[in-house]
Amino acid sequence: MSKLKIYDAKGTEVGDYEVADNLLVLERGTQAVRDAVVAHLAGVRAGTASTLRKGEVAGSNKKPWRQKGTGRARAGYRQSPVWRGGGVAFGPHPRSFELKLNKKVNQLAFRRAISDRIAAGEVKVVDSLELPEAKTKAFASLMKALGISKPALFIVGKVGRNVVMASRNIEDVEGVRASDVNVYQILRYPAIVADRAGMEQVKARLEKS
């Protein structure tokens, strides 16, 4: 049984949060984690790089000079890739870099990633992340009380407006719903804070896997 400390908004311990050992996966899944991260990074690539082929470059089909007798190399058109201002041979074109990841592999990757962080005691649980007002100062005070430094990931059961408004001006801080958090986010941030509702949803995802 893994136990995580539960804190209130003032940083005071108010109890323990237990996660059953049978929900954690620590002996397998490293390759699945790598595949999930690679797939995520590939999926967020824009893939908008584009060059013009010789058939797309503006210009006429007129032969620059006659075939023989000039002493120069033969040339058939000014759009040739070997000419300045011509088309690009084998250049990039808009494409999708998205990689398909098996559902079970993705589930295993999530279980392994969050299990490592929980087993290492690197996840802090807060009783509630609700803020009385949408001010950055209030959110920064909450982070200071919890002893959290940037970068940090906040996993919540429900994203409240005040939390979103108060945290968006703080660099390297991200808030995400527990139902949407992915492997890349779990690994990227050295500090993870989850409210009680968020941890319940994380447990539900572990049980479902």
Image (cartoon, helix red, strand yellow):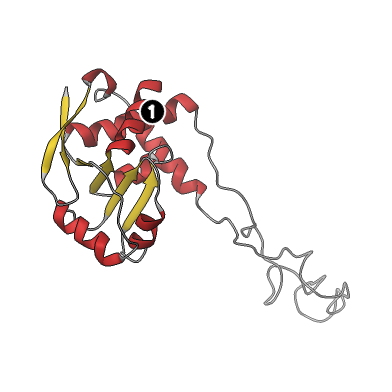
Location of the N terminus (image quadrant): top left
Residue 31 seen from this side: no
Left/right placement of residue 149 relative to residue 62 reads left
Depth check, front residue: 151 or 102: 151
The residue at 33%/38% (across/down) is 198
Three-letter code for the amino acid on which mark 1 is drawn: Arg
Q: Is the residue 193 above or below the residue 161 in the image?
A: above
State how many labels appear. Answer: 1
List x then y, in percent, for residue 29.
Answer: 33, 27
Local crowd at mark 1 within 10 Å, few (<14), some, or many (≥20)? some
Left/right placement of residue 184 relative to residue 84 reads left
Left/right placement of residue 134 relative to residue 83 reads left
Q: Is the residue 208 above or below the residue 10 in the image?
A: above
Depth check, front residue: 153 or 185: 153
Q: Secondary structure at mark 1?
A: helix
Depth check, front residue: 38 or 161: 161
The residue furthest front is 132
Q: Is the residue 77 above or below the residue 98 in the image?
A: below
List x then y, in percent, for residue 128.
Answer: 27, 44
- Snapshot quadrant of residue 179: top left
Depth check, front residue: 50 or 18: 18
Residue 22 seen from this side: yes
Location of the C terminus (image quadrant): top left
- Snapshot quadrant of residue 115: top left
The residue at 16%/58% (across/down) is 144
Residue under label 1, please give it.
205
List x then y, in percent, for residue 38.
Answer: 42, 42
List x then y, in percent, for residue 80.
Answer: 74, 69
The residue at 66%/65% (across/down) is 51
